[in-house]
Image: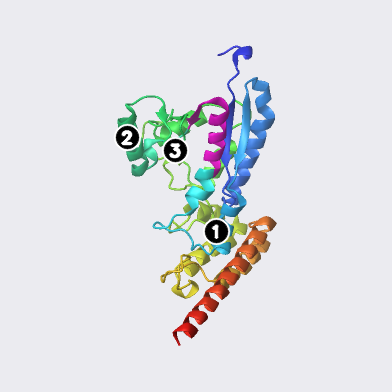
Amino acid sequence: MLPTDERKRRVYFISNNTLVESPIFQGFVDKLLDHVSESVGALQIPVEVVRTNPIPEETFWVNLLGKGYPAPNRNFRWCTDRMKIRPTTRFIREQVSKNGEAILLLGLRRAESTHRAQNIAEREQRDGFTRLSPHNDVPGCYIYTPIKDLLDEEVWLAILSSRPPWGGSYRDLVTLYKNANGGECPFVTSTDDSPSCGSSSARFGCWTCTVVQKDTALDSLIAAGHEHLEPLSDFRKRLRQVSENPEYRSKFRRTGQPGLGPLTIEARKMLLDELLKTQAEVETELVSPLELRLIREQWAQDETQAVLRELAKTASLEECN
C-alpha cells in the first residue's frame, strides 16, 4: 500500500442518476454514496463521490412529454445516450482536459450477456489484450475492466466474504437483490448446482423503461411488499400503450415530412395529467418543477409552429387559386 504522502492521484466514484431510476434502487444508491462520502476520509485517500445527471433539456420527461418522443423501444432507444452516456462522458472529458488523461474503471463482465461478451472480445482483439483499452469517444481516457472474467457466483462470493472498505456491510445490497428476485436468493456455498443471486434475471434500471416487455425487478419489489410502487408499473404500461397507438401520434415528423411523428400535444397533455396523478399516489417527486416549465415551453413552441405551418399552407393554396 502506498504511503499516505504518495496518494496524490484523485479517484472519483461516479454515479449517474437518470432521474427515472427505480425509487427503491436509487434510494439504496443515495444512501450508499452518502455513507461513502462521510466515511472515506478515514481511509486517507483522495476519493470523491460524483453524481451526474442529464441536463434539464435532455431528461426523460422533457423529451417524451415536452418534445413528444414516443416511449423508447428497441428500434428507437433515444434514452440511453441522453440520460446515461452523455452526463458521465461530460465529467470524464473534464478530467481528461484538466489532467491530460484518465483511467475509467468499469465493472463489465462477459457473463452478463452474450452481447456484452461479444463487445469485450472485439475490444480485446482490437487493442491486443492489453489491460488498458482506449476509450472509443474520449481521447486520453483508457478503460480498465478488472472483473471482466468473473462469473456471477464469483462476484457474490467476493461480496459475501468481505466487508466494504468504507465500513458497514453488504446486507442492504443482498436484501435489495433478494427482493428484486422474488425473494429467492440461494447463495452458492458449495460446489453443487445451486443458483445464486447473481444468476437472477432481475436487473435494475429506469422504472419508465419500455424497451423490455416486463420489468421483472419492479414487479418483484411490488410483490415483496413495496405495493406503493404499483402505480409506477401501471403508468409504464400506459406509456407503451399510448406510444404504440397511431391515434396519439402526429401525421408529420418534426422535419415537416409526412410520416408517423411525435406524440400529439393532446396526448402529451393527457400523459402529464396522468403522471401528476401517479406522482400524488406514490408521494414521490417523479417530475421536477423545472421539467414542468420546460415541457410547457416546448408545447408553446410546437403549437406556434403548427399555427405557422397552417398559415403557410393556407397562403400556398390561395396563390394556387
Mark 3 or mark 1, earlier in chain: 1
Chain part drawn in magenta? 87-105
SS label for mark 3: loop
Q: Which mark, by number, is residue 63?
A: 1
Magenta segment includes 101: yes
Residue at image coords 48%, 48%: 81
Q: Which mark, by number, is residue 137?
A: 3
What is the chief secondary structure element of the magenta stretch? helix
Q: Is residue 42 left or right of residue 250?
A: right
Q: Quadrant of the N terminus?
A: top right
Work out whether residue 181 can be spotted.
no
Q: Quadrant of the C terminus?
A: bottom left
Mark 1 or mark 2, earlier in chain: 1
- Three-letter residue code for mark 2: Ala
Residue at the extreme left of the image, as rendered: 125
Instruction: List the residue tagged with mark 2.
Output: 121
Q: CA distance from mark 2 to mark 3?
A: 19 Å
Q: Which of the two residues, 240 or 199, is positioned nearer the viewer here?
A: 240
